Image (spheres, rainbow, N blue to C red):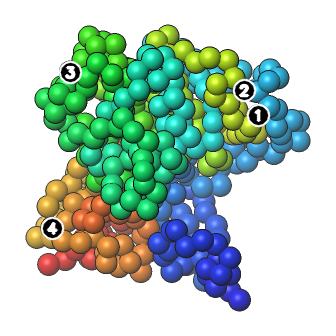
Amino acid sequence: MNTQEREEKYELAVYPRRDIVLVGGQGARLFDDQGREYIDCASNVGVSNIGHGHETVAKAVYEQYLTLGNCYSMFYNPVRARLAEKLVDLAPGNLKRVFFCNSGAEANEAALKFARSSTGKPEIVACMRGFHGKTMGALAATWGPEYQKPFAPMLPGIKHVPYNKFEKLEAAAGEQTAAILLEPVQGEGGVRVGEREYFQKVRDLCNDRNILLIMDEVQTGFGRTGTMFACEQFVPPDMLCLAKSLAGGLPMGAVLCSDRVSVPLKSHTSTFGGNPTACAAALASIDVIENENLVQNAKTLGEYFQQQLRGIESQKIREVRGLGLMIGVELKEKAGPYVQNLMDKGVIVLLAGATVIRLLPPLVISKEEIDTVVNALKDVLAD
Ligand SMILES: Cc1ncc(COP(=O)(O)O)c(C=O)c1O
């Protein structure tokens, strides 16, 4: 049996697969088992912001695992303490405490629970095309009948309104609303950038009505959009949900909370949450982001990338949009076939809905690599 056959035989078929076996990665490059090389414009869906195979994180993980790999949070631990302090230092001023977990869905699950415990109110308003994960609570906030239907009934009390439409949100937020949950840029939903005026109005509404604002930055965090957190370009939230690239590729999630958030002792815990190995990886990864100027890279190279993409003359392109190195190329037709065509040309991209090619390269991608990707797109989208 080869790798494909083995995975198909022994794993549940929940992921649509691509027909390659990846065995290595370095920087913004990936390698398959046939010796082919790819420019990575997917970053494992926003995980590999610092690129693949970074020595700084590898060393930190190795050393921490040998020192103390796990430490349940009933005990204090200096590495966890340092990471909590670092995240609070990096985040907007009103976010002062951290809850550690292991994934994006778990971060959102925690935030939904914290919203209820902090306000005593049960309801959440989220957005159409929003994506917050697929565990039971997060799934109820995620948009999409295709995801929800097999697992009905959903957690009650979650309403969905159109994104960037303040009047609809205002009408949906009532007496019983605990929190509004938003992505600053909708990723899975098609790379749709939030409008700043909309976010300001949402912030004011939350203040007026004692509603908590939760920003899901699982995909936009850690430099992706040209600032460390995208909310710096919008408004400060009461809870900031993080995961994906937080620990440089190791599984980790976190919720940063303002003073408005309170949770009873023992009411929410996680065995692996804040384990020192993941914390050491996160501290090392944040060091890499800072020392290699990756936030600035995302901003300047993101602008360059978008500008080059806008220069492609193709009737097939409806729009190029994005923020930093989170970019969507919306086509007038289904984007699926182009994903394979691009892979044949050595470029790995993502989809975001049926018609959008999503580009989330590692923030270490070079200008030359971007030029190669643009040329590949030019070729496959030629009229
Ligand atoms: C904005 C956002 N929130 C939550 C999630 C879920 O994260 P995870 O797959 O780690 O549960 C994702 C994953 O794509 C995401 O993009």
Residue 201: assigned label: 3
Amino acid under disc 3: Lys
Amino acid under disc 1: Pro
Q: Residue 53: percent from the left, percent from the top? A: 65, 55
Q: Is residue 245 above or below residue 43?
A: above
Q: Nearer the viewer, mark 4 or mark 3?
A: 3
Mark 2: C-beta under 8 Å from nearest atom of ligand 1: no
Say if mark 2 contacts mark 1, CB within 8 Å: yes
The residue indicated by pointer 4 is 332
Q: Residue 118: percent from the left, percent from the top? A: 48, 16
Q: Is residue 180 above or below residue 96?
A: below
Would you say 53 lies left or right of 297 here?
Answer: right
Distance CA(mark 4)–CA(mark 2): 47 Å
Q: Residue 24: percent from the left, percent from the top? A: 64, 67
The part of the image, by quadrant, that contains residue 99 is top right
| Residue 243 appearing in the image | no
Say if mark 4 contacts mark 2, CB within 8 Å: no
Residue 80: assigned label: 2
Amino acid under disc 2: Arg
Distance CA(mark 4)–CA(mark 3): 32 Å
Secondary structure under the numbered disc 3 in the rendered image: helix
Tell me which label, 1 or 3, sits earlier in the chain. Answer: 3
Tell me which label, 4 or 1, sits earlier in the chain. Answer: 1
Secondary structure under the numbered disc 4 in the rendered image: loop
Distance CA(mark 3)–CA(mark 2): 36 Å
Amino acid under disc 4: Lys
